[in-house]
Image (spheres, grey):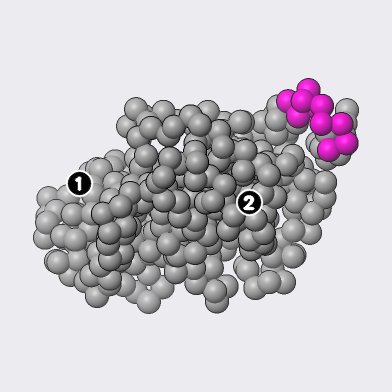
Amino acid sequence: MESIQQLIEKYSRTRDERILTTVKERITTEPRLWAVFSEAINNFYIDYVKGAPTAFLFSERRFCELFADHLKSSGIDIKTTECDVHDREKLFYDLYCGGIELIVVDNGQTLLYLELKDIFKIPSPSDKSVVNPLLVRSGDTFFQSAAAGRPDRAAEKMLYSSIVKGSFLLPVISDSEAEKNKTLQTVHPKSTDSVNIPSAVQADGLVCVPLFTDKTELEKYDREGLCKTKTVGFDMIRNFCRNNTPVALNPLGFNMVITGANIGKIEKNAADIETGNITVFDIETIPGAFAERLTELMDKTAAIECAYLRGIRANGVSGYLIIVGLQNGDKTGVSEIPEKLSEAAEGLPITIADLDSDFGKRAVIDQQPFYTRLSF
């Protein structure tokens, strides 16, 4: 039987969709795959490829180790991990919880781009499970970059905004379980005196209330399944801090400690995307002629890897905002897009923003790309 890498090489030469389908099936059924884990966040290493949050999977251990060595040489603490087929569905779910949208298979060899949604059924919005993909993605991006000495401030701002809007899992244990596990240290904040909350103790001895963005992060902490959970929001974090009880968000993940000293900074930076008289908003209906012309221009502008489309209101005047992800910062042809789109826009002003800019990154929070160039 041909290896996954051999199939990818064959697909690269032939562009035979049947081969691509076989590769997708093999990714879900192969006995073993390998991935890279970032030590700073205790989660899959995250990067951005074609403007999309990306994880890396490998069909052979040696491919994974080569990539890990490359990352280590750039100052990122990395370990490799084996992904057994019995845990494959959990692997994909964990990637989803981490905000991953794109998977690169066998980076460093003949590689393949796969969208996560093509190999994993994304949970429906009606699913009531607590998940915070954007928050985890932003937190992982920020803390991973900070550990490497290059903190991503745009990701930090996204993280703050997501925390204020998020819902979280608060672990609690029964009186009998607390009595049985004498070694289990609990905390009793004033706002929850009647509840036993297991603690998350930091390296410096600081005792915190643990909160989790999803069950994946909770399971890293509660491996024996002793805890039940309550769903809480940012108000509860605020209450804890007011009562001088620090919070550790995902203590066995990126481990963000929130206290009375930094909660004000989080709230201050969590404002909606409004700067002066500029507001960014969703477009309810995109005119067909405009969408068609914009797609045509995206296809013809080779420097653009992806684009997001939103509305923008400046000084009372509304128009289109196009946020573009560029290949290696190449802006060739981008400045000409507004003029070429003007007729289809029917007189509405058009603003172009770079996805790598602070404004661009904030403008695409919770958004899906309007256009993605995927060259498999």
Q: Earlier in the sequence, mark 1 or mark 2?
A: 1
| Position of residue 233 in the picture relative to residue 296 (left or right) | left
Query: Which residues are drawn in magenta?
Result: 12-22
Image quarter of residue 8: top right
Query: At x 68% / y 71%, what residue is drawn?
Result: 74
Q: What is the secondary structure assignment of the residue under circle 2?
A: strand
Q: Which residue is mark 2?
A: 304
| SS under mark 1 | helix
* Residue 18, above or below 250: above
Q: Note whether 104 is above or below 334 in the view shown.
A: above
Along the viewing direction, whichever of 316 and 242 lies nearer the viewer = 316
Q: In this orientation, which residue lies closer to the viewer: 286 or 7?
A: 286
| Residue 215 location, quadrant | top left
Relative horizontal placement of residue 195, taking residue 109 as reference (left or right)? left
Instruction: Kindly identify the residue that appears in the image at 77 percent across and 45 percent down.
Output: 111
Q: Amino acid at mark 1?
A: Asp
In x, y percent, where is residue 115? 61, 38
Residue 155 coordinates in the image, percent (x, y): 45, 62
Q: What's the mark number on residue 175? A: 1
From this viewpoint, is residue 228 visible?
yes
Residue in the picture at 40% in, 46% down: 348
Marks 1 and 2, how far apart at CA: 58 Å
Residue that appears at 37% across and 69% down: 202
At label 2, counting other C-alpha atoms closer than 10 Å, the crowd grade (few under 14, some 14-19, many 20 or more) is many
